[in-house]
Amino acid sequence: MVQTEAPSRVAELIEPTRVHSRLYYDRTIFDEEMRKIWHRTWVYIGHESEVPNPNDYVTKSIGPTPVLLVRDRQGEIRLLLNKCPHRGNQLCAYKQGNRATFTCPYHSWTFANTGELMGYALPDGYEGVSKAGVSLGKVARIGIYRGFVFGSMAEEGPTLMEHLGGAKAALDQLCDNSPTGEIELTAGFLQHRTKANWKFMLENETDGYHPGFVHSSIFQVTKSGIANLYGKDSTALTRDYGNGHTEFDLRPEWRRLDTPLKWFGTSEERLPEYTAAMKAAYGDERARQIMIDGSPHTMIFPNLFIAEIQIFVLQPVAVDETIQHVTAVQFKGAPDINRRLRQQTMGSVGPAGLLLADDTEMYERNHRGALIHDPEWLVLSRGLHRERTDENGFRVAHSTDEVPQRGIWRHYLSLMQE
Amino acid sequence: MDPMLAEKPVDLAALSPVDLHHRVAQFLYHEARLQDTHAYDAWEQLWEDDAIYWVPANGHDTDPERQMSILYDSRSRIKVRVEQLKTGRRHTQTPRSELARLISNIEVAAVEGAEVSVRANVLIYEDNLRGETIWAARNDYRLRLVEGAFRLVRKKVGLVNNARPVFTLSFLV
Ligand code: FES
Ligand SMILES: [Fe+2]
């Protein structure tokens, strides 16, 4: 097959059960995704706990664009673009800090951390020029749910709640695992550089077909029973929440085993403080159910992956390069579980992770494979015959089925066609 | 046993600085060769039971008990890591990275009883399916003399760019 670089309509590259390799390597499609997805839909930016105090800021991103997540003097969350409106200089060169104002190093214009211009340097040169209306660029809309801060570059569009839809339940399930109902992301992020298109990660996060193979080495060495969750007899489900959000739902398996904290490979006896705090917060029965169900495994389109005990943030920086940012979830008010959450996270994810280094190897091989033109089409038909809808009307199927991937592309197509 | 390690000092304090430096350097070169050649078992056996193997992220003075690190292994996790590599299904090391590392700027920082603290710079060339990668690090070691041979108690690999995104790091660093 000869590769054609003539403009192609994305619609011609996506069918219900197969997608064209070109979607992963074509730069013009990547640019179109930036406009139609990343600069328009709700994108996860960061968590309120990363800027706990007034004047705290941390550098986040929307795709390749850096975004300053700021808590201003009044305590309000702001999303500012890191570009001086004078001559476009990069304003802040640091990853995080605490400051009420930002001064551009080029000609020393100074901005409040609300984004507004406070003053010109050598103001005599701007006689009669008003400062009003001169400000840093801003992410047009901010939406916050249970501490998770999302931004949309589009002035108008669905609300964050409309965007999250059914996947809102995953954020609730995650936070409910904390005795205070709050999580914190305070352990810092690992940044895993990956030579692959971002959609390989988006699709893999809820792919239940691969773990038994890609991760068989670590399952074997740690004698882990986890492999069974990805086997033929697993009762776990793959789910398509719509709007591109997908899930690998392990609750049927944990409920079958009916043992609190089994999901986290531990027990009530080994985490007495956490268990007591949960029972005090929710009552015995509800606490028990939460601790049986565990934390979700949900990919919120396009970039927030809740991986039970980790938060991943996907950042596409080029058509063939993505940064996976990842940190351990910390449950506020639960000291004895948090160290274990960090230890397991450090062992399994990031550049040296016993799990994620192998996933990432696959992403990079996926990408190199996409560049080979025959066959052009990639197959997403697994489990089509056993797809069904759950009690909430969402598509589900067997844990190894490609319901999530089909759902992702359905939503992707709708955004790219608008 | 490596011939260079066959001479057995009994007391670190009794060694001349030149002699101590020489023995430390020989040990670091030995470890480097085991890593470069993927001699997993021999490398694992260098570690003491109270070992800490640490590759920090986001700076060099972070608290690994509070902050994420790229790698923060106890002795038992070092063993798991090596066992995984030996399955032949650690995909990121199948095929294995081709490696050569240079160790330089070796300084003996302190001697305490049977233990010596060492600093060294390391430059690692890696070639794998993705391509070529250069890793640079300022390392800290704590070595313990046990029955005449050095063993690893603590190794901190301070990647100079650890505050930035880094590629998969799945060989023994
Ligand atoms: S570019 Fe920032 S003050 Fe001139
Ligand atoms: Fe995986």
Image (spheres, helix red, strand yellow):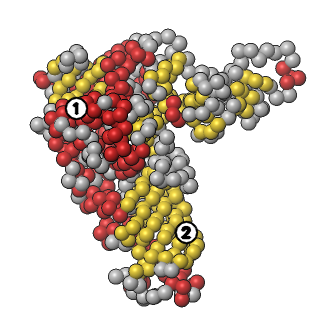
Horizontal side of B73 relative to A19 (left or right) equals right
Neighbour tally class for label 2: few under 14, some 14-19, many 20 plus, Cα within 10 Å = some
Q: Is residue A362 above or below residue A29?
A: below
Residue A297 rendering spot, x and y as whole percentages: 30, 33
Residue B86 rendering spot, x and y as whole percentages: 26, 61
Q: Which residue was labeled with disc 2?
A: B119
Considering depth in this image, is A290 or A85 the residue closer to the camera?
Answer: A290
Residue A175, image quadrant: top left
Q: CA distance from mark 1 to mark 2?
A: 49 Å
Disc 2 is placed on an element classified as strand
The C terminus of chain A lies in quadrant: top left
Q: Amino acid at mark 1?
A: Arg
Which residue is depicted at the point 35% across and 64% down? B75
Q: Amino acid at mark 2?
A: Arg
- Callout 1: residue from which chain? A
Residue B145 shows up from this direction:
yes
Residue A412 shows up from this direction:
no
- Callout 2: residue from which chain? B
Q: Which residue was labeled with disc 1?
A: A251
Neighbour tally class for label 1: few under 14, some 14-19, many 20 plus, Cα within 10 Å = some
Considering depth in this image, is A330 or B77 the residue closer to the camera?
Answer: A330
Horizontal side of A139 relative to B168 (left or right) equals right
Disc 1 is placed on an element classified as helix
Q: Are marks 1 and 2 on the same chain?
A: no
Q: Is residue A98 above or below residue A167?
A: below
